[in-house]
Image (cartoon, rainbow, N blue to C red):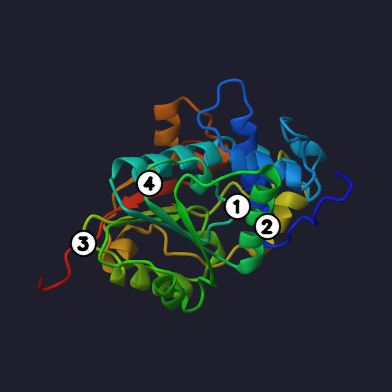
Amino acid sequence: MTNAPTLPDGVGWTAVLVAAQRAAESLSGAPAFRDPLAEAIVVHLGLAGPGEQPRFDAMPGDMAGLTTMMGDLVVLRTLHNDRVITESGVEQVVLLGAGLDGRAYRLPGAGRIFELDLAPGLALKEEAARAAGLQTLMRRTAVPADLAGDWASALLAAGFDPSRPTAWIGEGLTIYLDRSELDGLLTRVRDLSAPGSRLCLEIASRFDAGLADEEVADNGTRRLETLLREGPPIPPHDWLIDHGWSARHHTLVELGERHGREVTRWFDADRGGATLWMFTSSPLPRPGS
C-alpha cells in the first residue's frame, strides 16, 4: 500500500469517504448489500488491505468525524435508490455526479447506466476496477462532464435516449451546487425525461445543530463546510413542483425505521438536527398537455 494513489481533494475526497462507508457495509457481518467496487477502491487507495474493514480513524483527511455524523446515511440512501432502479423497470440509469458509485458492478438486469462526473473521478474508479479484475453487470458509459455546465449535450452524444424511461440518481449532490446551477440541472433533466422516469434527490435542511459540534469537530467536518454551496430552497417541495417534478419523498428517519438502521441526531429534526428528504419524483404533466 506504500505506492497507493494520492487521495483526491475537494468533492472527490467526499466521494472516497462514501465509497469507504459502502465498503465497510459490504464487509460487515450481515451486509445490506455487497459493493465490490467500494472494496476495490479502499484497497486501491491504500486505505485498507484486501478483505479488511476500512479504519476511518486512521484514514488521511480526518474522515472519522463525518462518519460519526452520517451514521447509516450512505447505507439508507443506497438501499432506497437501488430499490427505485430495480423496481421501476427503467431501461436507463443516469448517475448525476457519479462519484465512486459501484452500481454498474453490482446491480444486474438494470439495462444501461450513464455516469456523469468530472474525468478524474471516473478515471480513479476505472483504475480500481481494473486492478481488482472487476467486470460490469450492465452496460456502463462514462460521460466526463461538469454538472454546472452543458452536460446534456455530452450525455446525448454518449448514446442516451430521451424517449426511454430513465432513473436519474443524485446522491449527495445538491449541497455542492448553487441555486442557479440546480435550476439549470432540473430543467435539463425534465426536458430529457420520458414518461415513467424517476428523479431521486436528497435534500437537507440547514444544520441548526452545527457541523462543528464537539462530538464530530475535526478537519473532516470543517473541510466539508468549505465545499457547501447555496443549494435548493428549503423546504424544497414547491421548487421541485415548479420544475415539473412531483414531491413524493421519505425522510431519512422514516427510512431508518423501515430498515432498522441508525439515524444520528444530526439528521433527526426531533433531536435538533436537519431534516433530510429523499425524493422519488415523477415527471408532472406539462401545462396545457
Q: Which residue is mark 3?
A: 284
Quadrant of the rendering where the N terminus is positioned: top right
Q: Are the two marked residues, 1 and 2, in contact with CB atoms closer than 8 angstroms?
A: yes
- Of mark 3 and mark 2, the one earlier in the sequence is 2
- Of mark 1 and mark 2, the one earlier in the sequence is 1
Q: Which residue is mark 2?
A: 124
In the displayed structure, 70 sits above or below 158; it is above
x then y, percent, for residue 59: 79, 43
**Which tag is nearer the camera, tag 1 or tag 3?**
1
| Camera sees residue 63 | no
Q: Which residue is mark 1?
A: 100
Q: For the residue labelled by badge 4, is the local secondary structure a helix, a strand or a loop?
A: loop
Q: For the residue labelled by badge 2, is the local secondary structure a helix, a strand or a loop?
A: helix
Crowding around mark 4 (Cα neighbors within 10 Å: few <14, some 14 to 19, many 20+) is: many
Query: Could you give the CA–CA distance between mark 4 and mark 3, rounded to whole angstroms?
Result: 24 Å
Query: Could you give the CA–CA distance between mark 3 and mark 2, rounded to whole angstroms?
Result: 37 Å
User: Quarter of the image holding residue 255?
Assistant: top left
Residue 104 horizontal side relative to residue 52, left or right? left
Residue 110, disc: 4
Q: Are the two marked residues, 3 and 2, in contact with CB atoms closer than 8 angstroms?
A: no
